Image (cartoon, rainbow, N blue to C red):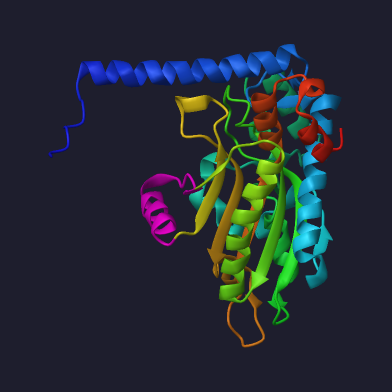
Amino acid sequence: MSTPATEQGPAADREANDSLTQLDQARADFQGRLLSAGLLVSTGIDGLYGRSGTFEDIVDGVDRLVHDAGQAAHGAKGLRRLRFSPVLPRGSFEKTDYIASFPNLTGSISTFTGGNREHRALLADRDAGRPWDGHLSSAGTMLVSAACHPLYSTLAGEIPATGVLTDVYGYCFRHEPAIDPARMQAFRQHEFVFVGAPGDAEAHRDFWIGRGLQLLEDIGLEAQAVPANDPFFGRAGRMLVTNQLDENLKTELVVRIYGDLDDGTAIVSCNCHREHFGENFGITTPDGERAHSACVGFGMERIALALLSTHGLDIASWPGPVRNRLGF
């Protein structure tokens, strides 16, 4: 039996546009309900929110679960717990190569370094309603794009044969203004990062695919593990996307926050970096080879939003087992 040809033309275009409109409306409706309930607080810029105490209680409950899962899996192996600021040195940022792949998501910190004369010029532009940020200069620092990025510079040199396991948690920034509450510009990741031998790095990633699915199931979330790719920028990015998919380097655990209107929202990401960070940061194993790395990143706000979408905005009405698991 032959396969029917894919529908094309105005009718198909209208159907695609209707679907997109429905998805955008669903995202706007969810954002509106979260704001009306006071769970998120508008700052006037899409993707930047204040969080209520209740929202933070959800994040804290999820964080406890993630922390405990990491301790159960890696505590006996010397799991280190590190916390970094959401700002890192520009030199470290450049070694990640993030600017080459995601310039559109990057956040750079600028500050004023001039004297009185330069300050007067800045104020004159501001008073005239002209852009004044051209009077600022680089502070030599960048906003953290992934929670694990500040870690790698601390591992430069030779690491133990057993590798290094680290629990990292912190705020990240990506310039993605959107009405979708799940696409925040400032958000938190809780990561478990392994740096060491290639096989051990892959095993770390593979372990957390299954363990992550179980953790999400325990709090009533129906998640799927799907091969994925990062949104690499530019013409060269298309080749990176193909390589990432072909080599099975990235798996996302997705939940359908908006039902069948899209393919789901990634709330956990499990990644193999190969020797990328080992090469760029000079991290070696005792045999002189470049260390490989892998990480699992739990998106804390996204998991909280998936819980609110699945169980409702009133956490007092959530299923008892879910409330108990989260410590409510």
Which range is magenta? 226-247
Residue 323 forms part of the magenta stretch:
no
Q: Is residue 325 left or right of residue 110?
A: right
Q: Nearer the viewer, residue 77 or 125?
A: 77
Q: Residue furthest top?
A: 36
* Residue at position x 58%, y 82% in the image: 289
Give the vertical position of 98 relative to 318 (above or below).
below
* Residue at position x 61%, y 73% in the image: 200
Q: Where does the image place residue 87, in percent across and percent down from the top left?
A: 75, 48
Asked if residue 84 can be seen in this view, the reply is: no
Question: Which of the 4 image quarters holds residue 75?
Answer: bottom right
Q: Nearer the viewer, residue 166 or 43?
A: 166
Asked if residue 69 can be seen in this view, the reply is: yes
Q: Where does the image place residue 298, in percent across and percent down from the top left?
A: 68, 46
Residue 234 forms part of the magenta stretch:
yes
Q: Is residue 43 left or right of residue 103?
A: right
Give the vertical position of 265 relative to 248 (above or below).
above
Q: Where does the image place residue 301, in percent across and percent down from the top left?
A: 70, 35
* Residue at position x 51%, y 15% in the image: 25
Q: Quadrant of the C terminus?
A: top right
Q: Residue furthest left?
A: 2
* Residue at position x 40%, y 20% in the image: 19
